[in-house]
Image: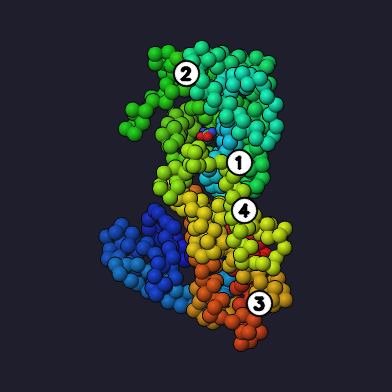
Amino acid sequence: MSLSAHLETGILEWLRNNKLAVSGGPWVKVCQDERFGHFQTNVAMVAGKMLKKNPRAVAEELRQKFVADVHLAKVDIAGPGFVNFTFTPAALARSLSMLRQDPHLGVAQTPVVRRVVIDFSAPNVAKEMHVGHIRSTVLGETLTRLLAAQGHQVIRDNHLGDWGTQFGKIILGYKRAGQPSLTMDGAVAEMERLYQETHRACEADPALLEAARLELVKLQQGDAENVALWKKFRELSQAAFDQVYERLGVKFDRTLAESFYNPWLNEVVDDLLAKGIAREDKGAVVVYFDDAELKDHPFLIRKSDGASLYATTDLATIRYRVAEFKADALVYVTDGRQQLHFKQLFAAARRWGYTAQEFEHVWFGAITGSDHKPLKTRDGTSVKLRGLLDEAESRAAGILRGKRADIDEDKLREIARVIGLGALKYADLAQNRNLDYVFDWERMLAFDGNTAPYLLNAYVRTRSILRKAGTLSAAAGEFELREQVEQDLARRLLAFGDAVQTAAREYRPHHVCNYLFETAALFHRFFEHCPVLKAESEGLKNSRLQLCQLTGDVLKRGLYLLGLETVEEM
Ligand code: ARG
């Protein structure tokens, strides 16, 4: 059990024994200021308020419960009724030994396993993935790993945008261009170009617009030629997406694109009509809401010409995910501009009867240039993801070449791949996702600061000291936490599980980033203060080697959860 969990259990027991039905928690927090102690709780103040008793008196009662605890060096009352706890070095050492043996490294396994469907990435077919897609892709993969680490069952579903009016224009453009052969390389760029060209031509010429509409109608009615073209576009796009996913180390359990749900769309609308959740309005079908926030935002699910929409597909998707995947939670990772859509969708779904499920829209801000405007290339188009990945790798290689003249080119490129892609992902994840973030190569590739290179470097350091000691796995022995910095590092390592839990609960991986950054910084401090190989005794040397190893394990696991690979040297 982690140190905070030990205290939390004690507090819950105390609440129970005193029949205090105080709701809330977790009650134990890490002390912001270490001088006060390791952990702190305000539960006495909450209970005091409830009982109309002096909170400091309640705090004293709580303190009495813990004074005899052998793991604690100090239990103090502070301010209006905070209780601060300080563990003994021996308690830290014992917990650390337990952590060493825990395959989950302190990440608590959930008592209630949930089935969570995570809908992420979901680019649109016949368009290149651009810089915006990196956020959904990277965040989604990370959330999957965080939830799986707690023991949840996670299903990654790529809801590709493969249906919509754009196909009328793409098909028309392709036919007008004489159906050029599309090779894998550059196929998607070509489709995107054809679309844009036709889109512009349609704006100038109503006859063309009508022709595009007819191509779309033919596709929708199952015309063999158009369906074959659409399938070809989809396959080529999928192949291009897969290359990006492969490079990013992202996997999906399912790829059920929008068109997959076409057979059920009418049925869904009819069902909502029959249940009185949706109603007809000037030939269209709409879901109206009563509550203040959505009252002025009806949800359109069938247009007056009978066409279905993105919204209709999303409703059908919910029904499918609950019926087929037995989803307890449905998580969607998209940019913040879709907030209203998901509010409407979730509200409609609840009325439709999905009240037992958790719905979560995990939204993120934009990636901007240094001018705080959405990132664009010099000619004003969106930045393509593929090019970004290439640039990340080549920039990292450039930096490495300057630092390491001794390693051969192949190895250097492999290390650069891990650092470059890691830096790109990490820069994205390290920010609170709701904020816009400024894309800055120099900063994300810097070897100091809260960056991937900094963390990878700390990991490499833990490995190189073990190699120097002639082992890659320190002998399991007792921990001897002699110096303050060793105790600080120990407490940090013991808090890994808490960081993962917070990040998973809030769907905010940056908590793990902050945690790893602090851990790496503490490790460097430890390393400067405490001789490892030249420690005074064999026992102390082994304890310090174990600290190096455990730090390395935690960094590696944390980076893995963020979707980053590690290297053994750099
Ligand atoms: N294809 C959409 C886009 O690129 C994202 C889809 C998100 N998922 C969903 N179920 N609506 O904006």
State the CA–CA distance, disc 4 to disc 2.
Answer: 42 Å
Name which quarter of the figure residue 365 lies in. top left
**Which residue is painted at 70% across and 26% down in the image?**
181
Q: x, y percentage for residue 292?
A: 32, 32
**Would you say the beta carbon of the disc 2 residue lies within 8 angstroms of ligand 1?**
no
**Would you say the beta carbon of the disc 1 residue lies within 8 angstroms of ligand 1?**
no
Mark 4 lies on residue: 393
Number of the label disc, if any, that sits on residue 357: none
How packed mark 3 is, by other alpha carbons closer than 10 Å (few <14, some 14-19, many 20 or more), is: few
How packed mark 2 is, by other alpha carbons closer than 10 Å (few <14, some 14-19, many 20 or more), is: few
Q: What's the amino acid at mark 3?
A: Gly
555 versus 335 height, above or below: below
Q: Secondary structure at mark 1?
A: strand
Name which quarter of the figure residue 252 lies in. top right
Q: x, y percentage for residue 185?
A: 68, 36
Q: Nearer the viewer, mark 3 or mark 1?
A: 1
N-term mark: 2 or 1:
1
**Which residue is painted at 40% across and 48% down in the image?**
371
Q: Nearer the viewer, mark 3 or mark 2?
A: 2
Q: What's the amino acid at mark 1?
A: Arg
Mark 2 lies on residue: 204
State the CA–CA distance, disc 3 to disc 4.
Answer: 41 Å
**Residue 192 shown left or right of residue 8 in the figure:** right
Mark 3 lies on residue: 477
N-term mark: 3 or 2:
2
Mark 1 lies on residue: 156
N-term mark: 4 or 1:
1
Name which quarter of the figure residue 406 lies in. bottom right
Q: What's the amino acid at mark 2?
A: Ala
